[in-house]
Image (tube, grey):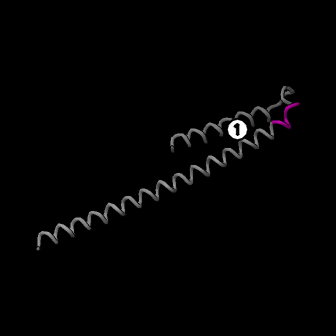
Amino acid sequence: NKADMELGIEGVRQALKVLREYYNSDGKDHAAATGSASGVIGMLEVIEADFAKGFGEMTSVEATAQTDYEKASKENEVEKTEKEQDVKYK
């Protein structure tokens, strides 16, 4: 659902931020793992893009469904009124 997607995107963004800060900081603790880091960060960037794409598609589908529902409801209301008037004047 929408809330889960938002949490997922935020979680991936936080992970990317922490990793980038760590690997961009000065220090020799991570010097040997720098190559691996680019692979992990790259993978997280792909995951973030996938989450964002999925979220956009889900939001679009929900908006379309809401519009369709409102349109159908209005059409049903008009049709009901027409039928009530037909019965009234017969």
Left or right, 9 with respect to 78, comes to: right
Farthest top residue? 29
State the residue position of label 1. 16
User: Counting other residues with Cα less than 10 Å from the Cα at mark 1, is it few (<14), some (14-19), or many (20 or more)?
Assistant: some
Q: Is residue 30 above or below residue 50?
A: above
> Magenta: predominant secondary structure element?
helix
Q: Is residue 69 magenta?
A: no
Question: Where is residue 40, by image quadrant?
Answer: top right
Left or right, 24 with respect to 84, comes to: right
The location of residue 33, given as percent across then percent down, is 85, 32
Total labels: the figure holds 1
The kind of secondary structure element at disc 1 is helix
Q: Is residue 20 above or below residue 65?
A: above
- Residue that appears at 75% across and 40% down: 41
- Residue that appears at 14% across and 69% down: 87
Question: Where is residue 57, by image quadrant?
Answer: bottom right
- Quadrant, the C terminus: bottom left
Left or right, 26 with respect to 75, comes to: right
The location of residue 1, given as percent across then percent down, is 51, 43
Q: Identify the magenta region.
A: 32-36
The location of residue 5, given as percent across then percent down, is 56, 43
Instruction: Give the amino acid type for the residue marked by disc 1 in the picture.
Output: Leu
The location of residue 62, given as percent across then percent down, is 47, 53
- Residue that appears at 26% across and 67% down: 78
Residue situated in front as seen by the camera: 77 or 34: 77
